[in-house]
Image: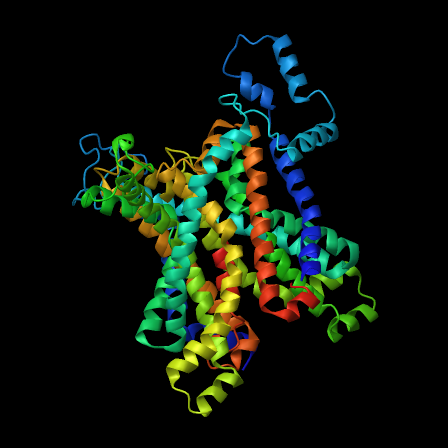
Amino acid sequence: MFAFIGKRLAQMVPLLFGITIITFAVIHLAPGSPVEAETAMSLKVSAQARENLKKLYGLDKPVYVQYGQWLGRFVRLDFGKSFVDGRDVIKKIAERIPVTLAINILSLFLIIVVAIPLGVISATKQYSLFDKISTVFVFVGFSTPTFWLALLLMIFFGVQLGILPISGIQRIDVSGMDPAARVLDWGRHLLLPVFVSAFGGIAGLSRYSRSSMLEVIRQDYIRTARAKGLPEKIVIRRHALRNALLPVVTILGLAVPGLIGGGVIFETIFAIPGMGQLYYQSVMARDYPTIMGIMVIFAVLTLLGNLLADVSYGLVDPRIRVSGRK
Amino acid sequence: MSLKKIIWKRFSRNTLAVGGAVVIACIIATALLAPYIAPYGPTHIDIDNVLSSPSARHPLGTDELGRDVLSRMIYGSRVSLEVGFIAMGIAVSIGVIIGSAAGFYGGRVDSILMRFVDVMLAFPSFVLILAVIAILEPSIVTIMAVIGVTGWMDVARLVRAEFLSLKERDFVLAAKSSGAGNLRLIFKEILPNALSPVFIAATFGVAGAILIESSLSFLGIGVQPPDPSWGNILSSGKDYIETAWWLSVFPGMAILVTVLSYNLVGEGLRDALDPRLWQAESFEKIEKPGQAAAKILTE
C-alpha cells in the first residue's frame, strides 16, 4: 500500500512542474509587464523608477532565469508581495483559508448526507415516481447556473421573507454578542452559501450512487442473499449498500476542483472573505503575484483530491493497487 | 435497417431528448430572427419606465436604464448561441488534433501530450479561465477563445482512447498495407469512426460553454454592456436585488432551459450512438458506475 501511495506521489512531481510552468506562462503572456500594471496609475513614475522595478522583479533577465528564480522563491513559500496593498501574498492567502475550508467541509457533508440516500432510494425503486422525480432534479441540477440559484435564494429568503442575511459571514455588531448567538449568526450567514456550493455536487453524487447501487443489485451475491430467503431490508442494507457505497466515498476527492471553481463565484456573490473571493478580486485588480499564488494552490489541492480518490480506491479495491488505476 | 435509421429511431424514441432538440431549434430561430421578434431594440431606452415591473408594455419589465428586458434577452440568445458553438468548435478541434496525435503515434508523443492534458486538468477550469481573462481585454471574442483553449482535454482523452482501439483493427491494417500514409490513416480511416463520442461530448460542451459565458458576464468580465447577454442582465439583477426581481428571474430561466436542452440532447445522443447500449433494455444496465455523473461532479 505504501509503495502504491509512494508511486502516486512520485507521479505528482512532474505534474507540479507542469502546473508552475503553465501558471508562469499564462501570466507572462500578458501584454504589458507587471511593472506597467503597477505604475500605469501614476504618470509621475520616472523611467529610472521603472527600471528599478523591473530589476526588482527580475524582468530584465531572460524568461527561463525569471522562471527559475520565481520557482526557487515559490518552493520556499515566498509568493512575493501583492500589487494591491504590498502585503505578503502568502499571508493574504493564509487568512482566507479557514472560511473557505469551513464552507467546503460543510458542503461536502451536506452533499454526502443528501445525495447518497437520494441515489440509493432511487436505485432500489428504479422507475418509480421517486426515481423519476430525482432524475429530473439531477438534470435540472446539472443545468442550473449556481450564481442564478444564489440570486433566487437571496431574493426569496433575504428580500421577500427577510429571514436570512444575504452577504458576509457575520453581523457588524458581532463583537457584542455572546458565543452561542455568535455561532447562530455565523450559521445563518453560511446557510445559503453552503447550500449553493453543495447543489451541483448533490446532483452529481446522487446520480453516481444510483448507478453504483444499480450495478451492485444485479450481482450474483445479491441474488444469493435473496434466494436464501433474507428479508429485502437486510439484503439492501447489509449486502448491497456496503458494496455500493465504497466507490461512492472514494470519488469525493474528485469533487475538489468543482468546489473550488464554484467557490470563486458564490464567495463573490455572497461577499464571503474566502480564497475564491480573493482570487476574483485579484483577477479584477490584475494582482499577478496573488493570482499566481492562488492558481498554484488550487491546482495542488486538485491534485491532492485526485490522490485521495486514488488512494482510497486502492484501499477499497485491492486489484487497483497492483494494476494502477486509469 | 441502415445505421443512420437505427440511430434516428433510438433518438426519436427518447421524448426528453426530442423535446430538448425542439427547444434548441426555437432558440436558434429566436436568435436568427431577433430584430423581427423583439418588441424593442436591445439598447432602446424608455426613459419613462426605468426599472418598471412586468407590464403589457414591457412583458418582462425594464432594467435600470429603461431598456426592455425581453428584447435584451432575445438579442442575448445570439451571444449564448455564438459562444456555445464557437467555443465548443475550438475545444473540439484542439482536442481532436491532440487526441489523434497521441493515440495514433503512441510512445513518447503520447506520454508528453497526455501529461500536458493532466497538467491542464489540474487547474479547476473556471480558475484557469479567470486567469487568462485577467490578462486580456474582456470581449466576446476573448471569451470564446479562452473557453475553447481551456476546454479541450476531455475530447482529447476520448479521441485518444478511440484511436488506441481502432488503429489495430483490420480495416486500418488493410489500408496501411495497401500503402496509405499516416495522414490518410488518421483522417480518412480512423477519425470518421471515432466521431460519435466526440459528437456527444460536443453537445455537452455547448451547454458548458453557455454556463461559463453567463458566469463570466455575470461577474462583469464577459460580454460587456451595452451588448446584451443573459449573464450581464443577471448582473444588473444582483445590483437591484432588493427592488427588481424580474431582472434576476427571467434571464436565469433562459440559461437553465437552454443548458438543460443541450444536456438532454447529449444524453439522448449517448443512448442512440453507442451500439453497446442497443442490446440493453435500459441505459443503466451497462452504464459503468456513473462515469458521466462523476465527470459532472468534478467539473
Q: Quadrant of the N terminus of chain A?
A: bottom right
Q: Is residue A68 left or right of residue A168?
A: right
Which residue occupies 70% across, 69% down? B166
Compared to B77, does B241 lie above or below?
Answer: above
Q: Nearer the viewer, residue B288 or A119?
A: A119
Outermost residue on the left side: it is: B56
Q: x and y percent of residue B41 in the render?
A: 30, 38
Q: Quadrant of the C terminus of chain A?
A: bottom right
The quarter of the displayed image where residue A288 is located? top right
The quarter of the displayed image where residue A165 is located? top left
Q: x and y percent of residue B62 in the render?
A: 24, 38
Which residue occupies 28% across, 47% down? A152
Which residue occupies 53% across, 65% down? B291
Q: Is residue A255 left or right of residue B27?
A: right
The quarter of the displayed image where residue A293 is located? top right
Q: Is residue A133 shown to the viewer in this render?
A: yes
Compared to A212, does A326 lie above or below?
Answer: above
Outermost residue on the bottom side: it is: A228
Which residue occupies 18% across, 42% down? B57
Q: Nearer the viewer, residue A223 or B197?
A: A223
Q: x and y percent of residue B279 in the render?
A: 53, 82
Q: Is residue A142 shown to the viewer in this render?
A: no
Q: Nearer the viewer, residue A242 or A11?
A: A242
Colour option used: rainbow
Q: x and y percent of residue B16 in the render?
A: 38, 68
Q: Nearer the viewer, residue A264 or A231?
A: A231
